[in-house]
Amino acid sequence: MEKIAFVFSHAPHGTSFGKEGLDVILGVSSIIKKISLFFIGDGVLQILKHSKSENILARNYTSSFRILSIYDIKNFYCCKSSLIDRGLYSHNQFILKVNILNSYFFRIKLDDHDAIINF
């Protein structure tokens, strides 16, 4: 496998999908060099800057997404319609520098990968 896409489609709290996905990415990054992250649906909430997880007594692991650049992971994509559906319009609301794509181009980018893993 040369290129792996990790798709985040769940909200950051309420399930462990996001944290587990981040852990897998960090582990796989030592083996696979071409990794991309895709955020769709409630998954776009994973990368909000001003997450207030302490209000629900949860640990804020989402800030850990920032360390991905140390692992040379720089391809981050968000679905534009998912952002609009959640009232998120500004690029500066995210902890990562994301490429915002409409549904068509989002799918084209996703199809360019050898494996797709959903969290």
Image (cartoon, rainbow, N blue to C red):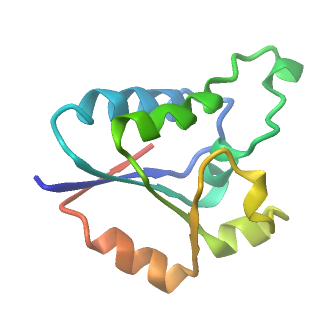
In the image, taking residue 31 as reference, residue 56 lies left or right, namely right
Count of number-bearing discs: 0
Residue ranking furthest to the right: 55
Could you tell me which residue is drawn at 65 percent across and 36 percent down? Answer: 12
Q: Quadrant of residue 72?
A: top left
In the image, taking residue 4 as reference, residue 86 lies left or right, namely right
Could you tell me which residue is drawn at 35 percent across and 29 percent down? Answer: 26
- The one of 111 and 28 positioned closer to us in this rendering: 28
Picture layout, residue 11 above or below residue 14: below
Q: Quadrant of residue 59?
A: top right
Picture layout, residue 37 above or below residue 19: below
The quarter of the image holding the C terminus is top left
Whole-percent x, y for residue 87 in the image: 85, 64
Residue ranking furthest to the left: 1
In the image, taking residue 67 as reference, residue 56 lies left or right, namely right
Q: Quadrant of residue 51?
A: top right
In the image, taking residue 56 as reference, residue 66 lies left or right, namely left
Whole-percent x, y for residue 24 in the image: 34, 30
Whole-percent x, y for residue 38 in the image: 47, 58
- The one of 103 and 3 positioned closer to us in this rendering: 3
Whole-percent x, y for residue 90 in the image: 80, 65
Could you tell me which residue is drawn at 45 percent across and 32 percent down? Answer: 22
- The one of 50 and 14 positioned closer to us in this rendering: 50
